[in-house]
Image (cartoon, rainbow, N blue to C red):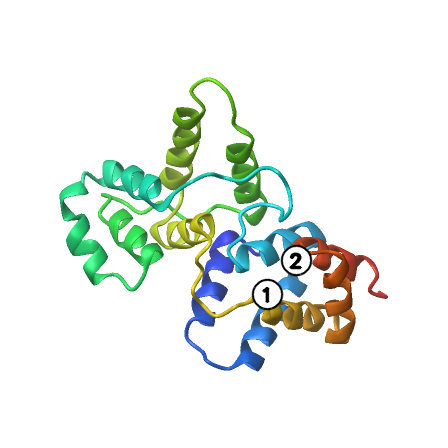
Amino acid sequence: MPSFYDFAIVSQSLGQTQSRLQMAETVGAFLAKLDIDEAEIAARFMVGRAIVMGGEKRTKISGRAIWKIVAEMTDSADQGEDIFAAAEDFGEAIEMTLKLRAADPEPTLTIRELNEKFVEIAAIEGRHARRRMLDLLRELFARASAFEARYIAKILIGEMRHGMSEALMLEAIARMAARPVSEVRRIHMREADLGQVVRIVRSSTPS
């Protein structure tokens, strides 16, 4: 079963090609390997959306909060300037920082588990909400490998920076289901959330 690590590998590969056709084929093939729930989640994650688009909830996690957590985990706050100067983007900075740990955890996160964590974080309200939210985030990064953390951070701040736009994701969804992209675009006109577009397309695809 594809894991979040597999998702991260695909995301990395997207940043290494300029071909829109290849990107759509790569993502379409990956989504096709997933069950419908995982594919719905992965489509959102791939364009930097942690939770369902259009809902009232959001994760409310800033890049500064993520950096503070991983810097505390690795006692590297004083190295921040050098790390960010060497990193290509925020996600890579987080990966570099977590590589300073004595040991890198084995990648065990699933796409479903990460989605559940994001939903849980977004649902936190009331007394000490920020502290509870950061505690959950700390637990998540403690479990993630440095490479997984790179893409967790990217999703949370909504900056994947690999070229997979909404429009290109629609092409990938069409390839996933072997359906005309025009049909997928019409569905997207009615349903803004890309995850729901995946669900609709997959649910109506002849077996």
N-terminal of the pair, mark 1 or mark 2, is 1
Q: How many marks?
A: 2
Q: Nearer the viewer, residue 13 or 45?
A: 45
**Are the residues tagged 1 and 2 within 8 Å (C-beta)?**
yes
| Residue 36 against residue 120 in the figure, above or below | below
| Left or right for 120, reference 93 | right
Label 2 sits on a secondary structure element that is helix
The residue sitting at 74% across, 68% down in the picture is: 184
Return the mark for residue 21. none
The residue sitting at 81% across, 57% down in the picture is: 203
Label 1 sits on a secondary structure element that is helix
Return the mark for residue 194. 2
Badge 1 is on which residue?
A: 166
Q: Quadrant of residue 91?
A: bottom left
Q: Residue 130: percent from the left, percent from the top?
A: 41, 27
Q: Nearer the viewer, residue 100 or 102?
A: 100
Q: Residue 31: percent from the left, percent from the top?
A: 63, 63
Q: Residue 25: percent from the left, percent from the top?
A: 60, 76
| Left or right for 187, reference 115 | right
On-image quarter of the N terminus: bottom right
Residue 179 seen: no
| Residue 188 against residue 67 in the figure, above or below | below
The residue sitting at 29% across, 41% down in the picture is: 70
Q: Residue 158: percent from the left, percent from the top?
A: 46, 53
Residue type pointed to by label 2: Leu
| Left or right for 20, reference 145 | right
Q: Quadrant of residue 204?
A: bottom right
The residue sitting at 15% across, 55% down in the picture is: 82
Residue type pointed to by label 1: Glu
